Image (cartoon, grey):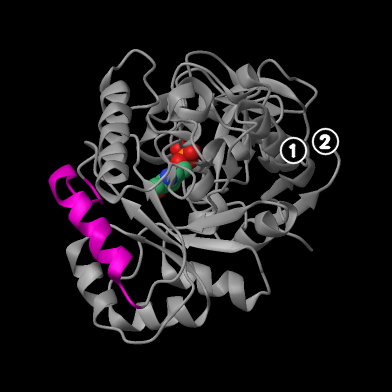
Amino acid sequence: MTSPAYAIVNLKALQHNYQIVRQYAPNSKIMPVIKANAYGHGMLRVATTLESADAFAVARVDEGVRLRKAGIKNKITVLEGFSCINELDALLAHQLDTVIHSLTQLDMLEARKDINVCTIWLKLDTGMNRLGFQPAEFVNAYKRLNDCQLIQGDIILMTHLANADDKHDNTTVKQINLFTNTFESILAEQGINNEQNLSSIANSAGILAWPNSLTDWIRPGIMLYGISPFPVNTGEHFNLKPVMSLHSRLIAIKSLEKGDKVGYSGTWICPKPTRLGIVAIGYGDGYPRHAKAGTPVLVNGLRVPLIGRVSMDMITVDLNSQPESMTGDPVTLWGNGLAIEEIANYADTIPYTLVCGITQRVRFVEKTIIN
Ligand SMILES: *Cc1c(COP(=O)(O)O)cnc(C)c1O
């Protein structure tokens, strides 16, 4: 007996999307971002499938440690870096590379007397105002790192784009310019030639929309999973293929009269006689509770609208357009044939939260053919 709710992870689609990244940035090294369990797709599965990647990025030290313990040999960068001595120890013990974004981290590094080969990603805050040194602190931070006994590896300069998903917002131009200027002032100060100093700016939106952000290293996340980072289109627009699709099945069908109420609080009142389908998927599986009435659902591959509230284990759909449908029929919540970007719009969220939100209860099935 298997649970009706399952997610297919299409590994061929993942490899295909990686090739699309490659086409956009033929001269950059690619660091797939596989934080948060690879955006819900399974971190190890994704790392193994993209084994030729130049490095992987995770958010936290423990994510990197898990990859190492599972035998992943690629370079691994911890995007938030370490936040205590224990994490620094773990990071060095497992040969993880770290982002350095604060003076606190620098102090902790300088206090160490051991020597380690570890690549440092020194982060400049160009306006996101989250992690990173301010431009005025940056050159000094760079010098301190360069003098730091512990560090024998490369120092890669990086920043993160805040608004790259809006192609008309010139924040991105300003961020890239600020980064480039700061980068050059370091080169001037140190008399170092360009070849030794590497940089990294682009996330998925940068890769797809801002060619100036394509530097030595790129950091694609969402696009690898076949999803557009832009609110205005879907991954298909860029020839990306969805990696995750979410499925379940009809577990009951009933006939309601005009005026009958459906679900919690009876928010849906049937405007006409309705053939109602009950699907075994709910927010307990990660289907968004805020999906509005009218959110499309595929039953037997055809669109029907969600009606009533999403509950923990079930949703209800209007099957009037499918008089022949039966209990047991297959249902797709997103994936091939139903863009997750569209579902995110109906649920007033972004697709990132949907893929990250799939819960333990959902079975994962790997698929290795493209469609
Ligand atoms: C998550 C993350 C990325 C990937 O962003 P996408 O929009 O998913 O491509 C890149 N860089 C940093 C620093 C991140 O935190």
Q: Residue at x 49, y 31 (%)?
A: 214
Q: Is residue 218 magenta?
A: no
Q: N-terminal of the two: label 1 or label 2?
A: 1
Identify residue type, mark 2: Ile
Mark 1: few/some/many CA within 10 Å (<14, 14-19, 20+): many
* Residue 69 quadrant: bottom right
- Residue at the extreme front: 191
Position of 94 relative to 228 (above/below): below
Mark sitting on residue 281: none
Q: Can I make out residue 140 in this image?
A: yes
Are discs 1 and 2 less than 8 Å apart at CB? Answer: yes
Give the side of residue 229 with respect to residue 66, left or right. Answer: left
- Element under label 2? loop
- Percent across and percent down for residue 285 are 54, 52
- Percent across and percent down for residue 219 are 50, 43
Labels in figure, total: 2
Mark sitting on residue 370: 2
Ligand 1 resides in the quarter of the picture at top left
Q: Which residues are magenta?
A: 130-149
Q: CA distance from mark 1 to mark 2?
A: 6 Å
Identify residue type, mark 1: Ala
- Which residue is label 1 attached to? 13
